[in-house]
Amino acid sequence: MSGVWAAISSIPYDPPPTFAPVPAWLRRAPPDIVTEAVFYAGAALAALHPIARDEHPLGSLWRQRLALTCAATLARRGGRTEDEAMLRDHWYLRRDKDDPGPGGRILAAWRKLGERASSSDVEGWIFGLATTLGHPLGSLPSEIVELASRHTMREHAVPVLAAAEIIAASRRVLPNEEALPLWLADAVLAHQLRWPAPMPLIAAHLTRGALRKAPQHLEGETAFMSALCAAYTNAAVAAIDLYSDLARRATRLLTVVPKLRGKDAGVMVGILMVEDAQPAGAGKTASDRSTRRLFERLVSLGAVRELTGRPTFRLYGL
């Protein structure tokens, strides 16, 4: 958390920008016909694009919430019991050097995805992914690394097709790997769209059954492409809705700042704007008791929520 305290002074207290709502027709079930499914996905990603490109600090929190949803989905598919609340607990109530556990390591991988700035250092971010997910350095097949590199160095006419190809190739070479292809798909898509950081999207919306069909995409089969486009359509709509909700909450939080009197009030508001959750512990200059009073005040003003429902070991966030 020391890095957050050090960086918080650079965060502006400007309200997050607002964007156009999702077109109503994108909320209908995407069609099965692949050409129409591609159109839907393109339209949904186009609606998401200006938000993903925006560099307001709220984007960090937004990506963390998306990462949490993706991690909880993958944990559940892997037979684990952690839901979003449990993963959040493991992440924020541990000491900095503690192992967050298997579910927490999945969350770490998707948080890392949302933090990575787009660059041409493909091997750097793939190796970072490999170690986060438990793969030794240099263990990933070279053809996967090379394919990801090609997709980040040139623009594809259909960005979702680049994501489909990296998933299909990864599943063909590593048929038992689920997390890695989905992580790479979002990373490659972000490079294609020149987003400043990837969006954790697809893991929470592409079914395991659809993922099993991915290798057939390399043989010209379109069933997986239709499923992937439908998943990206739904993921983009959900991400836009989440941003709209967080932007409304962040604006409310900023309106109550003049009413706060705690020593660390301004710093804590800054943290709440960029972090998924925050425990009510001692601040930079304030005691843990003072910080708890600050959070209780924020809750009473309707600016912050207590996220656990517990009387102790509470976590607060937008």
Image (cartoon, rainbow, N blue to C red):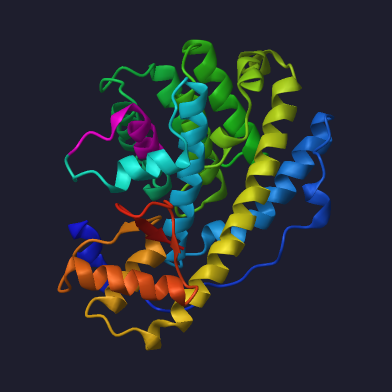
Residue located 26% across and 74% down the image: 9
Q: Main secondary structure of the magenta part?
A: helix
Quarter occupied by the N terminus: bottom left
4 is higher (above) or lower (below) than 170: below
185 in the magenta segment:
no
Residue located 63% across and 43% down the image: 235
Judging depth in this view, the residue of 304 and 197 nearest the camera is 304
- Whole-percent x, y for residue 97 in the image: 16, 40
Judging depth in this view, the residue of 223 and 149 nearest the camera is 223
107 in the magenta segment:
yes
| Segment colored magenta | 98-110
Q: Relative to residue 1, is residue 218 drawn left or right?
A: right
Judging depth in this view, the residue of 112 and 72 nearest the camera is 72
Q: Is residue 153 visible?
A: no
Residue located 68% across and 50% down the image: 237
- Whole-percent x, y for residue 93 in the image: 27, 47
Residue 279, located in which quarter of the rendered image?
bottom left
Q: Relative to residue 274, is residue 187 drawn left or right?
A: right
Residue 248, located in which quarter of the rendered image?
bottom right
244 is higher (above) or lower (below) than 181: below
- Whole-percent x, y for residue 255 in the image: 47, 83
Q: Relative to residue 201, is residue 300 drawn left or right?
A: left
Spot the residue most to the front. Answer: 311
Spot the residue most to the bottom. Answer: 258
